[in-house]
Image: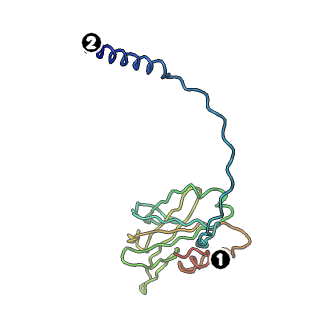
Amino acid sequence: MKKTKFKISYLLIMLVLICNFSCSSEDGMDGIDGMQGPQGEQGLPGTDGKDGNANVIVKTVDNVVWTVGSFLGQEANLFEINDTDITQEVLDNSLILVYFKLVTGEAWYPMTYAFPFDNGNDEVITFTYELNKINIYALKSTGPLNASIDDIRYFIIEGNSAVASREDLSKLSYEEALKRFKLLE
């Protein structure tokens, strides 16, 4: 029995010593990379993606909250959209089209939107753009218009020889703009 305990103790001590000396905390050098294997078989072709237009950026903004502003000297409601994609290059060479959707409907209306009443009053929703910003204005003959706008969508259209004149494009309906720039939803 004593011999067996001694042998077991001896073996345990040897195992502990072997483990302590065989394990090192230092990492060895990496080996040489192996050779590249042969090229595999060609896979099946994928399906074609949807056609698009790399020269047009489309963005949508919701949660329109009006603040007090002024349009051409007349008090108006104002909603500002800050966008760093509206660079000096865009201002010099591109066109921006803006559309809005009312809370109560699904139709998109182009800006500038003007509605004259029979009594001579009118309502106007329009926009301006400048470096890094689009300003949306809502006004009526008697002061600010609290337009119930749900979403605003705008297109930044890069100018090039394939794009028609600004006058032609500014009259596009929302659906015509989607078709013209191959952005069908």
The residue nearer to you, when weighing 6 against 178, is: 6
| Three-letter amino acid code of the residue under disc 1 | Glu
Query: Quick check: 106 left or right of 183?
Result: left
- Front in this rendered view, residue 128 or 12: 12
Residue 49 or 122: which is nearer the viewer?
Answer: 49
Residue 109 in percent (x, y) is at 48, 77
How is the protein colored in the picture? rainbow
Q: Kindly identify which numbered label has been placed on residue 2.
A: 2
Compared to residue 161, the image places residue 80 above or below, namely above
Q: Quadrant of residue 97?
A: bottom right
Residue name at image x 64 percent, y 66 percent: 54
- Residue 120's spot in the image, x, y percent? 44, 83
Quadrant where the N terminus is found in the figure? top left
26 relative position to 105: left or right: right
Q: Residues within 10 Å of mark 2 (few under 14, many from 20)?
A: few
Numbered disc 2: secondary structure: helix
Tell me whether the residue at label 2 lies in contact with that at label 1, contact meaning CB atoms closer than 8 angstroms: no
Question: Identity of the amino acid at label 2?
Answer: Lys
Which residue is identified by label 1?
167
Q: Which mark is residue 98?
A: none
Q: Residue at x 72, y 73 (%)?
A: 162
- Identify the residue at horizontal 47%, vertical 68% (top origin): 152
